[in-house]
Image (spheres, rainbow, N blue to C red):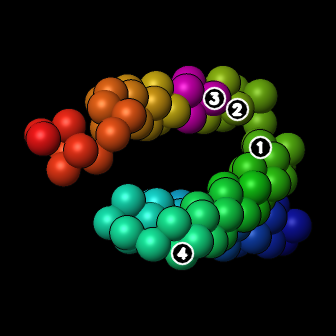
Amino acid sequence: MQNKKNQSNVGQMIQRCHKWRQKRKQLIDQARQTADEIERERLLQTAEHYGRMVNTEQGKIDSTRDPKEKAAAVAEQQAGEAAETSEQTEEDESPFPDFITNL
């Protein structure tokens, strides 16, 4: 009974993490498209907050997993982070917006 309850709780935590990751990505995308610096900063700070929430919740999820599951999850997470950083560096190559560099 207890194991089934833990699985249900972990499933809910995973769903929350997924929802928060999507919201964080949405906020970052909005910030990239916003011309107003103050609004961009607000969006990025909110996205950072969602990132901290995900990290906290992910820590809770990891603490309830078996050691074998943890190793697989860590490998999967590292692969996801590597993909995000490579995507981020591609977008951050030009320090200036296109309209400035195309003068």
Q: The C terminus appears in which quarter of the rendering?
A: top left
Graded by Cα atoms within 10 Å as few (under 14), some (14 to 19) or many (20 or more), the crowding at tag 2 reads some
Which residue of the protein is positioned furthest toward the left in this rendering? 102
Question: Which amino acid, mark 1?
Answer: Asp
Residue 62 is marked as 1
As helix, strand or loop, the secondary structure at mark 4 comes to helix
Graded by Cα atoms within 10 Å as few (under 14), some (14 to 19) or many (20 or more), the crowding at tag 3 reads few
**Residue contact at pointers 4 and 3, CB within 8 angstroms:** no
Residue drawn at 75 percent across, 55 percent down:
52
Question: Which amino acid, mark 4?
Answer: Glu
Question: Which amino acid, mark 3?
Answer: Val
* Of callouts 1 and 4, the N-terminal one: 4
**Residue contact at pointers 2 and 3, CB within 8 angstroms:** yes
Graded by Cα atoms within 10 Å as few (under 14), some (14 to 19) or many (20 or more), the crowding at tag 1 reads some
Write down the residue under mark 3: 74
* Of callouts 1 and 3, the N-terminal one: 1
Question: In which image quadrant can residue 29 be found?
Answer: bottom left
